[in-house]
Amino acid sequence: MKIPLSWLNEYIDLSDISVTELCQTMTMLGLEIESVEETGAEIKNVVVGHILSIEAHPDADKLVVCKTDVGEDEPTQIVCGATNMKVGDKVPTAKVGGKLQGFEIGKRNMRGVASAGMMCSGKELGLGGDHSGLLILDPDMEVGIDVRGPLGINEVVLEIEVTPNRNDWSGLIGIARELSAFYKRPLVMPEISLQEGTTETADVASVTIEAPTLCNRYTGRVIKGVTVAESPEWLQKRLVDAGQRPINNVVDITNYILLETGHSLHAFDLNKLAEKRIVVRTVKDGEKIKTIDEEERILNAEMLVIADAQNPVAIAGIMGGFDSEVGDSTVDLLIESAYFNTSSVRKTSRTLNLISEASQRFQRGADVDMIPLASDRTCQLILEIAGGELCTGSIDEYPTPIEPSKIVLNFTTINRKLGADISGEIQLALLESLGFSVESQDETGAVIISPPRRHDATREADLLEEIARLYGFSNIQSTLPNILPTEVVYAPFYKQLQNLRKYLCSIGLTEIYTWAFTSKEDLEKAKFKPSLITSIELENPLSEKNALMRPHLIPSVLNIASNNIRNGRKSLQIFEMAPVYTQEADKDEATQSDVLSIAISGGRSTHHWSQSMENADIFDLKGYLENIAQHLSGTELKFKACDNQTYAPGECAEIHAKGNVIGYLGRAHRSVAKAYDIDQDIYIAELHIKSLLQKKSKAAKFESLPEHPASLRDIAVMVDAHVATGNMRSSVTKAGGKLLKTVDIFDIYTGDQVPVGKKSVALSLTFQSHERTLTDKDMDKAWNKILKTLQHQYQAELR
């Protein structure tokens, strides 16, 4: 939103405050300054000139030679091609060395006659208008003065970002109200005086609201006999400075009031309305409308429209219709000023992909009390500029009054939360300066009524913000919180998570970052279906693809993997560590937990000419997870085969830690990989790491190298093919006792000499003692116990 300072000064006197100070104040109040622009900055050394004489050029029929007084000792000779001036006129004159929008004026010889300057048109000064003729100035202007001041082209324009929660800042009166409260200067509201005719408004027009939940209030006023023409120069300049394009006097006035009050209005050609009626209703089957941008819009039954007795003539709160717009032939007007449901306007605007100045304001919440003021102010300016007769009274339909918010304010609570000592009297005075009113009060607090324009102020915390803004953040002494700001309080696992990230990168994994949002379609592609744990839907998502807070990392990881593989990166080892968000069905509370997801695909390492490429498999992924658990807390993970529709049958396992399932790993199901456009095997894991983080790592223990030699033995057994070799290894380790130091599986074989449905598993056993050299008898005892354990638990047969 652009704010010309000269216009803003009409509502509050800021003439003694520098632009720099004003920008700092507005920033502290929450008004973000995006830019400061000075119009006419490229115009220099252009003054008011007085034409003393005009003579024909001796060698050019279309040129004349003028003697012009520019406030110097001698008149200046200027050759000019314009014909609309006469002796005695005052015109903008650029002296030698002057500049016009980057073009510097110098001495020139024009067909043998010297010319020392340039007389200017309005277009050359950035004022628009006809380029062929000079701009004729007011004859009372002083000769030789800078022309920018009298013409108002030395305007300072501030551009601000209006935050969605503060629609009351979308008009100059709203900005002035904030500055009035801060500087304790009077707010000057426009004086409105209307001369009404004898015709009653209700006799020439009618308004009916059929959808009161979508339109709380609608007012209409009628002006007869207007003359639609070009707006006066001052009005056009105001609009141009504020970034608006002048159209005609009636439309320009509604845009002017929009910028002044922040309230959007619309002017209908009354004679183009069937039966001169306004009906505020929802869309009927098959209705469509051609809007003023000459685009045909297909409407649906949920949309609110302004209709006449037959058809829609405007999309409520968004844009007027082409067939009822004001044109050169318009003589009678119906001025609309209304309040529309914010959600309805937002949804319609998004569905139609139609954003306008009106929709941006209505979807943030209009000021229901501003409706009659904006309507009367519009009528006042139309009568002054376009003429006509104002019908007596207005139609004001208000079937569903909007009740203001009532907020309980506790003085002590405000001071405690701010860390300040602001008296209750000052707190109330600050709020009242912003338009809040006090319904009742005592020594402890008060009941505050929020003004209708302040849709954002509904609770005590909002009042706290208002008090802090006006009191001044710089006036509140900095204090430390009552709690010790340690990682235990704010982020108990922060250091562990950061160290884990470094560790994962050190072992060859690449970290990725993705959005915390996902979609139902993306979850379904990964075969995650609704269960007792539901996804959290966003009320106002960035897009349909980001409509949910993600309950899993796997869809995000697979999207990244797919993009890399499709772009030629066939081998990848990636991980993401981030929160996921879930909510139990029928419960309001949501939970957030830290999850680690890893995906590997393609070769184990970068291909080298000296060796063949070996593809990674599920055991590489399992190794990563085991190393992570050991690195974090020394926890031993256990893996149990399971069925999970996200993973390929027979290649999926639950990840157990301390008796709890903390995740899954396996090869992605072919259908899942295909859904993500991945044409090669990809192994994925996802585990909740909180339980691993909660256990502190054990202190490192050191022991001397053993002085006695180790003894090695191998054992090969035949077991059923479905037996998990990891479980066998754990059983052997436990049965081997203190002397058994390591157990390694060095071969798994199926084929010749092994019956169908069986497999041969070979284990290498290392026995060692720090105290003595082991004998065969020592190892035989442990070896026999190991064999019996395998036979008993897995029906193993010794090979």
Image (spheres, helix red, strand yellow):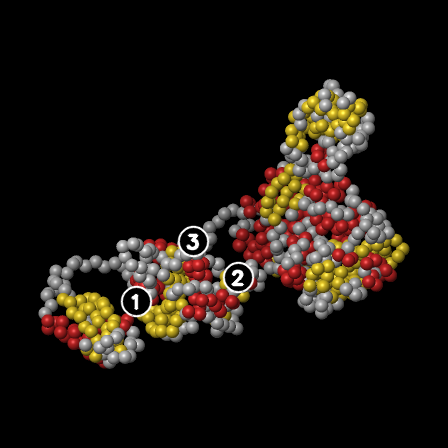
* Residue 267 appearing in the image: yes
Q: Which is in the foreground here, disc 1 or disc 2?
A: 2
User: Which mark is first along the chain, 2 or 1?
Assistant: 2
Q: Is residue 497 above or below residue 1?
A: below
Helix, strand or loop at label 1? It is loop
Question: What is the spatial separation of the Cα atoms under label 2 and label 3, in whole angstroms?
Answer: 34 Å
Q: Position of residue 728 (x, y in %)?
A: 25, 73
User: Which mark is first along the chain, 1 or 3?
Assistant: 3
Q: Is residue 310 left or right of residue 159?
A: right
User: Which mark is first along the chain, 3 or 2?
Assistant: 3
Q: Position of residue 219 (x, y in %)?
A: 77, 59
Tell which of 152 and 659 is nearer to you.
152
Residue at the disc numbered 3: 485
Residue 546: image tag: 2
| Disc 3: CA contacts within 10 A as few (<14), some (14-19) or many (>=20) | few
Q: Is residue 400 left or right of residue 423?
A: right
> Which picture quadrant has residue 647?
bottom left
Question: What is the spatial separation of the Cα atoms under label 1 and label 2, in whole angstroms?
Answer: 37 Å
Residue at the disc numbered 1: 636
| Disc 2: CA contacts within 10 A as few (<14), some (14-19) or many (>=20) | some
Q: Residue at x 33, y 55 (%)?
A: 606
Q: Which is in the foreground here, disc 3 or disc 1?
A: 1
Q: Position of residue 724 (x, y in %)?
A: 29, 74
> Which picture quadrant has residue 677?
bottom left
| Amino acid type of the residue tagged 2 in the rendering | Asn
Q: Residue at x 54, y 50 (%)?
A: 420
| Amino acid type of the residue tagged 1 in the rendering | Glu
Q: Is residue 548 left or right of residue 432?
A: left
Helix, strand or loop at label 3? It is loop
Single out the residue that lies furthest toward the right.
198
